[in-house]
Image (spheres, rainbow, N blue to C red):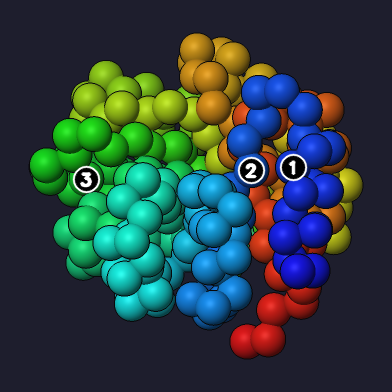
Amino acid sequence: MDIIKKYEEIKEGLGQGVRLMIVSKNRTEAEIRPLLEVGHRLFGENRVFEAKDKWKVLKEEYPDIELHMIGSLQTNKIKEALKIFSSIDSVDRDNLAKKLSQEDIRGKSFLIEVNTGSEEQKGGIFPEEADNFIDKCIYEYHLPIKGLMCVPPVDEEASPHFAFLGMLARRHGLKELSMGMSKDYLVAIEQGSTCVRIGTSIFGPRNS
Ligand SMILES: *Cc1c(COP(=O)(O)O)cnc(C)c1O
């Protein structure tokens, strides 16, 4: 099994204290199954309805699956999202944080996504607003914020973005750093990543 071989290889190279989140967006149930069979449980998806369809049956079979939302979350999909995801890693704006705090979020965790490259089309709180937003999520909305996530700009060196995210997390006493994807996860680990999010390097190129 090619996917499993890739998976084992990547996992071996991660070192202690770094979790592997397999990003299963655009992948079929058949592609995901072998990974569940070898015991992997942590997955990331970026769309609520895609995740719901795909994971409903799988979660019945494997109740200990840990599914994280890593894509932009619309406020009208919050309730659905909280049904399937154990963590929302893309909390990135005030109205989303506020609405999440009004739901039953027992047992859930959250990360704040920071748009470290200040890219207009991308999700994530802008760096200059991040300190205030993090404080607000923790002290005003009382969300259980575990850490930060970022996706650096594709055409820039990732390392400074990871370093910035690490500094921001330390300043707020946050432990989790979700950073690093297929092409830059080793750099992210050097910068203190606690969770790398990998799709392509395990499954191969995405179709859609
Ligand atoms: C798609 C995606 C990934 C995985 O990217 P690969 O390059 O396929 O490893 C990681 N994080 C987020 C937020 C994504 O949307």
Tell me the element at label 3: helix
- The numbered mark at residue 61 is none
Q: Earlier in the sequence, mark 3 or mark 1?
A: 1
> Do the numbered discs 1 and 2 sit on residues whose CB atoms are within 8 Å?
yes
Residue name at image x 49 percent, y 29 percent = 147
The mark found on residue 11 in the picture is 1
Q: In the picture shown, does residue 199 fall above or below 197?
A: below
Say which element carries label 1: helix
Give percent across and percent down for residue 94: 31, 44
- Residue that label 3 marks: 100
Amino acid found under the numbered disc labelled 3: Leu
Above or below, comparing residue 182 to residue 102 in the picture: below
Q: How many labels sit on residues?
A: 3
Depth check: 29 or 192 in front? 29
Identify which amino acid the numbered label 2 is placed on.
Answer: Leu
Q: Closer to the observer: label 2 or label 3? A: 2
Please tell me which residue is depicted at 49% across the width and 48% down the height of the picture.
41
- Please tell me how crowded label 3 is: few (under 14), some (14-19), or many (20+) other residues with Cα within 10 Å: many
Whether label 3 touches label 1, CB < 8 Å = no
Q: Which of pointers 2 and 3 lies earlier in the amino acid sequence?
A: 2
Q: Position of residue 77 (x, y in %)?
A: 24, 66
Are the residues at dot 2 and dot 3 in contact (C-beta closer than 8 Å)? no
**What type is the residue that disc 1 sits on?**
Lys
Q: CA distance from mark 1 to mark 2?
A: 7 Å
